[in-house]
């Protein structure tokens, strides 16, 4: 008589078959896992030969502080390009900053001081006040000079009379007239000093007013010194140089300005004036540039890009791909001897057309890695973290 089926619907033979199948599956799974995690054993016949020959390793490593080695047999060498740098004469800008036309001298037959145009109404008002203060100073200086001359002439005349009376004393000139002459001289001297003091006070007030107006002009964006250097077709562009680049700017430095309105035209110029203080909100230095616009193309308020420092000079240029920016500094890989490269810190300018000027840290005639230098950045950074070698004293 057959066994009745269980509650799961299987007979005892079915249960036995299912259990056998599960056991086989577990054994097979364990065997596969063991084969994967078991270390590979080389053939016995080759073990002796391999033990006698050390493995061949392609060396790319940090040797010491600021020095790395890239062995010739490493495949990485195929990705590297090397260049011998040479100095050349350039006129590329040291830095580039954005600027705005703040003032210009328009064409006309009037005096230059009456033909200034500004980009802001407050600048026009301050300039008009500055002209009045300047004229007031000229007037008070003239009054002061005339007052001094009048006082000197009057006292000189009265002193001459007094000396003449004193020479005729002894009965010819009454004592009363001599005393009157002395009194008149003292009065003239006192009045002269009073008049000169008043004229000097008026002049000092006019100078203070002019100084206050010049501060307003400087705060509004233009240094008053440019008004004394005004020339025909003069255009003043103001740009703000970051605090970190302040040392790059100086008066009479050459520049080249391109305007968004005329992208294909370049206007040469120079630094006309530099502000004496940094702006508090942006920590920048205001620099005024002087351009010549004979065609009267430029208008107050126009935006421009100023290339500062275009004076011709000898410089070393390198491809931007050679630079490695590690931490806060820039580095290049300089050939030393054999397969070793020195991680040299450099000071560079702005990138222009894929190249940048090296100002410090690299000499003409040295060989550097250009293409592929980025592949060695991590090993270069590792070498810089190594302690410097201490030179033993003799």
Image (cartoon, grey):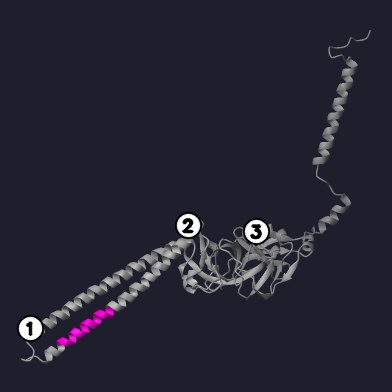
Magenta segment includes 317: no
**Vertical arrangement, residue 69 with respect to residue 188, above or below:** above
Q: Main secondary structure of the magenta part?
A: helix
First of labels 3, 2 by sequence position: 2
| Residue that numbered label 1 is attached to | 176
Q: Residue at x 36, y 71 (%)?
A: 137
Q: Residue at x 77, y 63 (%)?
A: 77
SS for callout 3: helix
Q: Quadrant of the N terminus?
A: top right
| Residue that numbered label 2 is attached to | 280
Q: Is residue 160 left or right of residue 274?
A: left
Point out the frontmost of discs 3 and 2.
Answer: 2
Instruction: Report the number of discs.
Output: 3
Q: Answer yes or no: do the residues labelled 3 and 1 have beta carbons within 8 Å?
A: no
Q: Answer yes or no: do the residues labelled 2 and 1 have beta carbons within 8 Å?
A: no
Q: Residue at x 85, y 26 (%)?
A: 23
First of labels 3, 1 by sequence position: 1
Q: CA distance from mark 3 to mark 2?
A: 36 Å
- State which region is magenta: 148-162
Q: Answer yes or no: do the residues labelled 3 and 2 have beta carbons within 8 Å?
A: no
Q: Nearer the viewer, residue 394 or 141?
A: 141
Residue situated furthest right in the rendering: 1
Q: Is residue 304 visible?
A: yes
């Amino acid at each position: 008589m057959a066994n009745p089926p269980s509650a799961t619907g299987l007979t005892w033979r079915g249960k036995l078959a299912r259990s056998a199948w599960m056991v086989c599956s577990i054994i097979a799974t364990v065997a596969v896992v063991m084969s994967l995690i078991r270390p590979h054993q080389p053939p016995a016949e080759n073990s002796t030969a391999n033990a006698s020959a050390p493995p061949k390793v392609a060396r790319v490593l940090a040797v010491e502080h600021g020095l790395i080695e890239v062995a010739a047999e490493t495949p990485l060498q195929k990705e590297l390009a090397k260049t011998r740098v040479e100095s050349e004469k350039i006129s590329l800008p040291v830095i580039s900053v954005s600027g705005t036309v703040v003032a210009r001298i328009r064409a006309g037959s009037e005096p230059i001081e009456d033909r200034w145009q500004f980009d802001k109404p407050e600048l026009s008002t301050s300039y008009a006040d500055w002209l009045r203060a300047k004229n007031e100073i000229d007037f008070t200086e003239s009054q002061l000079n005339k007052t001094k001359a009048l006082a000197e002439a009057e006292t000189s005349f009265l002193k001459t009379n007094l000396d003449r009376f004193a020479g005729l004393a002894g009965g010819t000139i009454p004592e009363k007239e001599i005393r009157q002459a002395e009194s008149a001289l003292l009065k003239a001297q006192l009045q002269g000093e009073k008049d000169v003091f008043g004229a000097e006070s008026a002049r000092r007030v006019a100078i203070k007013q002019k100084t206050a107006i010049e501060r307003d002009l400087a705060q509004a964006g233009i240094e008053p010194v440019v008004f004394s250097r005004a020339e025909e077709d003069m255009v003043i562009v103001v740009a703000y140089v970051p605090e970190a680049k302040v040392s790059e700017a100086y008066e009479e430095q050459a520049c080249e300005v391109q305007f968004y309105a005329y992208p294909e035209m370049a206007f040469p110029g120079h630094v006309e004036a530099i502000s004496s203080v940094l702006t508090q909100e942006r920590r920048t230095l205001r620099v005024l540039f002087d351009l010549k616009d004979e065609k009267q193309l430029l208008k107050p308020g126009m935006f421009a890009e100023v290339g500062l420092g275009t004076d011709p000079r000898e410089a070393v240029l390198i491809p931007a791909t050679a630079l490695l920016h590690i931490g806060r500094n820039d580095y290049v890989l300089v050939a030393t001897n054999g397969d070793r490269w020195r991680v040299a810190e450099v000071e560079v300018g702005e990138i222009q057309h894929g190249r940048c000027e090296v100002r410090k840290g690299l000499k003409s005639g040295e060989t550097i890695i250009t293409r592929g230098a980025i592949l060695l950045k991590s090993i270069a950074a590792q070498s810089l973290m190594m302690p410097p070698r201490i030179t033993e004293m003799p």
